[in-house]
Amino acid sequence: MMTTDVLQIRPATQQQAEVLALLGRITYEQSHGHFIEDKQELSNYYEQAFDPSNLAKDLANKNNRFHLVYYKNFPVGYTKLVLNQAFEGNEFADSCRLERIYILQEFLHLKLGNKVLDFLINKAKTLHFKNMWLTVYIKNERALHFYTKNNFTKIGSYDFNVGSLTYENTVLNKTI
């Protein structure tokens, strides 16, 4: 857990699956919704990816570490770190995947992402990981800029599917 005067990052529990589901839907819509051409496919994706019962199962998986991000005691985002997961075909050992850092749009100007990323990198280091990788949609310039500014480098590409639609993602890695 990380705590400052206004920012707190706390491990999420199975009892918070509904909060994660709501934050997930809203933040995904804000960050990616405009990229998805077929809104029915997007709706179907929400139903699967942000279903509270599916998130509760993800929370129970010992390789998943979810954290809720609070600003002035208000939940404004969440993270998901997947332990012991290497990107297929990469040469990096001791890898974890940063699957999600999502912050509600109205709080982005506070630059909470930098503190959240630092927290997650430190968490991964304490768990003895040497590399952290992630995927970013190629048209998500804000996220690409954020991660390259934080010394992540491109190591490959990855196709992400929303229903029958495929979206090319860049795979980034950082030695931590």
Image (cartoon, grey):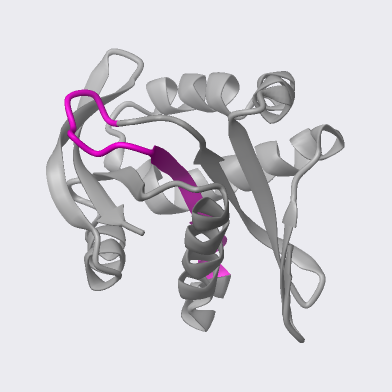
Quarter of the picture holding the N terminus: bottom right
**Magenta residue check for 100:** yes
Tell which of 7 and 104 is nearer to you. Answer: 7
Against 77, residue 109 (above or below) is below
Against 8, residue 98 (above or below) is above
Q: Is residue 93 left or right of residue 21?
A: left
**Magenta residue check for 86:** no
Q: Position of residue 90 (x, y in %)?
A: 18, 32
Q: Is residue 131 left or right of residue 166?
A: right
- The structure residue drawn at horizontal position 41% and vertical position 40%, both measured from the top left corner, is 97
Quarter of the picture holding the C terminus: bottom left
Q: Is residue 62 left or right of residue 90?
A: right
- The structure residue drawn at horizontal position 22% and vertical position 65%, both measured from the top left corner, is 148
Against 6, residue 163 (above or below) is above
Residue extending furthest toward the right: 15
Q: Position of residue 169 (x, y in %)?
A: 21, 38
Q: How many marks?
A: 0
- The structure residue drawn at horizontal position 54% and vertical position 28%, both measured from the top left corner, is 46
Tell which of 96 and 143 is nearer to you. Answer: 96
Q: Position of residue 70 (x, y in %)?
A: 72, 66
| The image quarter in which residue 75 lies | bottom right
Residue extending furthest toward the top: 164
Tell which of 167 and 82 is nearer to you. Answer: 82
Tell which of 106 and 40 is nearer to you. Answer: 106
Q: Is residue 59 visible?
A: yes
Q: Position of residue 127 (x, y in %)?
A: 56, 47
- The structure residue drawn at horizontal position 59% and vertical position 42%, both measured from the top left corner, is 24
Q: Is residue 61 left or right of residue 143?
A: right
Residue segment shown in magenta: 87-106
Q: Is residue 103 visible?
A: no
